[in-house]
Image (spheres, helix red, strand yellow):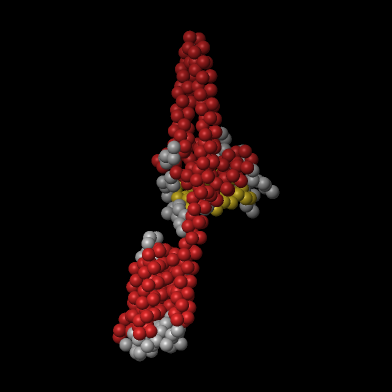
Amino acid sequence: MRWWRSLEPMIRDGLGAGLLILAAFVPGIAELGLQIGELHLHGTTGVGTALLVIQALSLVPRRRWPALSLAVGGIAWGVYQLGGYPTTVAGMALLLVLYSVGAHQERFRRPLAVVATVAYVVLAVGLHQRGSSEHVINYVTFFAVLAASWGAGTWVRARQLEEARKRAASVRQAVTDERGRVARELHDVVTHHVTAMVVQADMAGFLISADPAKAADGVASVARSGREALTELRRLLGVLDGVALPDEQPERIADLVDRMRRAGQPVDFAEEGGPGPEGGLGLAVHRVVQEGLTNAVKHAQGRPTRVRVRHAVSGTEIEVVTEGSFRGAHTPGHGLTGLGERVKVFGGTFEAQGTPQGDFAVRVVLPQAVTA
């Protein structure tokens, strides 16, 4: 059913309306409808058929414009009842429309409920005036069925809103935790690079008269350390300020791979479909690659490692595989465990396990967005 879900909601509802119209002309199914009043004044006529079709077609805009769907479908259904036309399965569309109003209507929910209730009372009075034999209890019971459909949609909407609120709170907490961790990284970066710059500058000062060439090398090292520090500081401060740096994301991953190669780890790296995601998701992609490579260097130094990052409309897939390592049992450490928790916050999937070939693979899928 993947092809069905890939269709636009209005197209799906349009197809459903078409099937409902067809069912309204199938003996044995056509009579299974939603009716009140029991007038039976007319048989099938052109007007009755038109009202039948309108009731079914009111399903088409039910998600995008639920109030319009209710107005069109409700009026057509009410006129059909007052006209005393035969029971039709197309009338069942009203229940789905009421559910959709409860689930998808954003504004004026209470006034719309009041208007719908008043309209039902007017319909009940009209049916009585035209000779309906229904008792008050019948009208009340029927109204309860209609209200239950609306209430079911309202309940689903409340649950979706609550789940969205919890997801948003989880993301905010994750961002807060990440910024605290970045603050600690900031301290490490400043301490490491500034200390190196001070040591290199002192050495250059001692060597400037004894060995000018070595002193020049020392000054160059200070400059290089300063540039690296500025790069790290800019990235970390950008995260702390909530500023996305999409243009630098591919270079950061590539630089990370280069550092691992210089450390003696053979890494085969490829990134497809860029640019990658921004903000928290972009940082998560970087952390996945970083932790995967760090794990490889720590536990399987010198083993060939393959890194694949694939960006698509639906999200980003990351794979870090270290060949011929982790034979036998291996328990993920705190880094991989924390990484799995980070991925779950964004609604992604995380796997870190050995393969039958004796490799160790970290596979992550991060969705581009989360919708309700």
Q: Position of residue 244 (x, y in %)?
A: 42, 41
Q: Residue at x 48, y 23 (%)?
A: 221
Within the image, what quadrant is residue 30 found in? Answer: bottom left
Q: Position of residue 368 (x, y in %)?
A: 45, 52
Furthest residue in direction top, as rendered: 209
Q: Residue at x 38, y 84 (%)?
A: 128
Q: Residue at x 45, y 84 (%)?
A: 135
Q: Is 92 situated left or right of 264 in this image? A: left
Q: Is residue 231 above or below residue 139?
A: above
Q: Is residue 354 visible?
A: yes
Q: Position of residue 297 (x, y in %)?
A: 60, 38
In depth, the one of 39 and 71 nearer the eye is: 39
Furthest residue in direction right, as rendered: 328
Q: Is residue 33 visible?
A: no
Q: Residue at x 47, y 46 (%)?
A: 281
In depth, the one of 326 and 335 nearer the eye is: 335
Q: Position of residue 184 (x, y in %)?
A: 54, 33
Furthest residue in direction left, as rendered: 46
Q: Is residue 129 above or below residue 290?
A: below
Q: Is residue 99 above or below residue 275?
A: below
In depth, the one of 176 and 302 nearer the eye is: 176
Numbered disc total: 0
Within the image, what quadrant is residue 279 found in? Answer: top left
